[in-house]
Amino acid sequence: EDGPQMSLTIDGIEFAYGKHKVLKGVSLEVQDGTFCALLGPNGSGKSTLTKVIARVHKPSQGTVTFDGTDVLSLGRREHARTVAYVPQSGEAPFDLTVREAVLLGRTPHYGMAPGAEDWRHVQDAITLLNLDELVDRNMSELSGGQAQRVLVARALAQDPKVLLLDEPTSALDLRYQIETLQIVRRITRTKGITALIAIHDLNHAGRFCDQIVMLDQGTIIKSGTPAEALQEDTLKQVYGLRVTVEEREGFVEVRPVVEDDLEYRI
């Protein structure tokens, strides 16, 4: 008999900035080893949800559990061993070298000083994100895209069970967007890590993610496989835009229907 399937369970999460309710009772389950996209327009709550799980924000109600453990009440180190968070690229530690910044991911794991095991994780993460040539550079010298890849490397060095990414690809050019998504997908597959990504690009989500959660105004409208969640009527409702959705070679492709309206012609 297999034991119960392990998962990240989000139950009844409410969060407000002052009087403005951003998350209104969000409940969601993500199985281990799943790459899950959080989609929705600006203000839908997708970034806020990653921040709640990362404990950047404290919800007014609701629970987050991972494999039965209450994630929101773990001690700091214990939480950091379970959950790694990649913020948007503006939040990088700029006075460190790339190597030092990635090593920060190991602090929940060692006592006074990093050991051989810690450096191995650091080196693996640096190599995985193609940062070998930049290791001795200061973070302040990097482009936004390079800094973003360092933050992903730092999170991977942390060796977490849950990886949270808050729009990690918005600062990256197309090649690195694809590479980063491929790396995260591979890690979920090979290490059984659960990854949640707040992302804008519907086609990237449809191509790389196993599960898609569509948020609108703080509630979940749809959750399922890319084919289940990326449906024309749902996307019209959420984004106010007509689209066509096609399945090609097993992937879901979304295309906006652009009306050729005379008013737009100058």
Image (cartoon, rainbow, N blue to C red):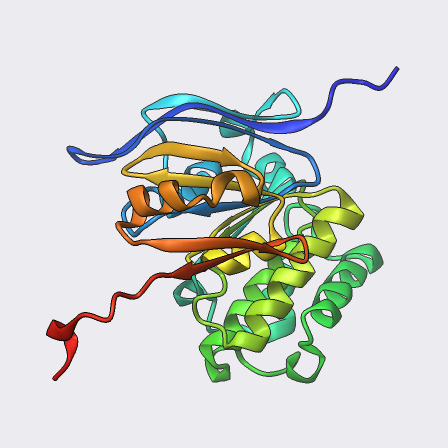
The residue at 31%/35% (across/down) is 218
Instruction: Evaluate whether residue 54 shows in this view.
Output: no
The residue at 64%/69% (across/down) is 179
Q: Residue 15 location in percent, x, y?
A: 30, 31
Q: Which residue is more in the foreground, 34 or 128?
A: 34
The residue at 43%/61% (across/down) is 255
In this view, 256 is above or below 15: below
Q: Point out the residue furthest to the top here.
A: 1
Q: Residue 39 location in percent, x, y?
A: 42, 47
Q: Point out the residue furthest to the right here.
A: 1
Q: Residue 215 location in percent, x, y?
A: 37, 39
In this view, 30 is above or below 172: above
Instruction: Evaluate whether residue 9 shows in this view.
Output: yes
- Tell me which corner region of the image, top left, top right, bottom left or bottom right, holds residue 50: top left
Q: Residue 265 location in percent, x, y?
A: 15, 80
Going by the image, does 191 lie left or right of 72? right
In this view, 228 is above or below 249: above
In this view, 81 is above or below 178: above
Task: Check the picture and name the quadrant holding the N terminus.
Answer: top right
Q: Which residue is more in the foreground, 237 or 4?
A: 237
Numbered marks: total: 0
Going by the image, does 104 lie left or right of 141? right
Task: Check the picture and name the quadrant holding the C terminus.
Answer: bottom left
The residue at 32%/50% (across/down) is 41
Q: Which residue is more in the foreground, 3 or 125?
A: 3
Going by the image, does 49 lie left or right of 153? left
